[in-house]
Amino acid sequence: MSEASGLRGVRHVLFLCTGNTCRSPLAEVIARDAAGRIGLELEFGSAGIAALESAPASEGSEIVARAHGLDLGAHSARQFTPEWASGFDLILAMDRVHLDVAESIAPAVPCRLITDYLPEQDARRGASVPDPFGGWTDRYEEAYQLIEASITAFLESPGIDASSDAR
């Protein structure tokens, strides 16, 4: 699937990780903020393949989000289910395990690694976003930086036309 055709009609994007307390909540708030700043009217959600329903974002994710002017205070973890996935046009997974689970649980929804959108010359393209859970704040910051770069590249991808001007 080409990136342009893969994004045509995308309005609802789901970010997927393991527990929905670290990487995918960060991706959700980063994407919401970035899309808003450039005038894209997209909706974002997040879930985990092994989430404890209603768990808050991890302390490390909250600290790093706050350092970047973002707020995870209202986050509540959600388990990835076929029903939840059906409301989205695209699933962006943090690693290959998440990608495999998404493809088996929600085969009708296109799935990609979040880092697939990085430029071809970026050595991180197609790599997993390392799980910072339980690590020091610098591990959360590293995850944040990779997620942010991937989302920036995603939002600049051909086929994203969800601005209010495009309607």
Image (tube, grey):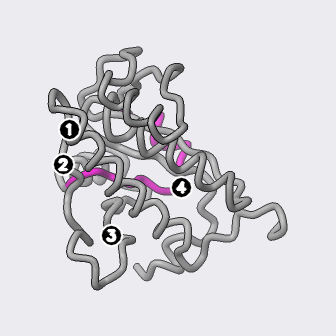
- Assign the N terminus to one quadrant of the image: bottom left
- Assign the C terminus to one quadrant of the image: bottom right
Amino acid on which the number 1 mark rests in the picture = Pro
Q: Position of residue 129 (x, y in %)?
A: 24, 52
Secondary element under disc 4, as helix, strand or loop, is loop
122 or 8, nearer to the observer: 122
Give the left or right position of residue 30, taking residue 43 as reference: left
Amino acid on which the number 4 mark rests in the picture = Asp
Q: Is residue 106 above or below residue 83?
A: below
Amino acid on which the number 3 mark rests in the picture = Asp
89 or 32, nearer to the observer: 32
Q: Which mark is residue 132?
A: 1
Q: Earlier in the sequence, mark 2 or mark 3?
A: 3
Instruction: Provide the residue designation for mark 2.
Output: 130
Q: Residue at x 20, y 38 (%)?
A: 132
Whether residue 83 is visible: no
> Closer to us: mark 2 or mark 4?
2
Q: Position of residue 114 (x, y in %)?
A: 35, 59
The magenta-colored residue range is 80-95
3D distance between C-alphas at marks 2 and 4: 25 Å
Secondary element under disc 1, as helix, strand or loop, is loop
Whether residue 106 is visible: yes
Q: Residue at x 38, y 28 (%)?
A: 63
Q: Which mark is residue 116?
A: 3
3D distance between C-alphas at marks 2 and 1: 6 Å
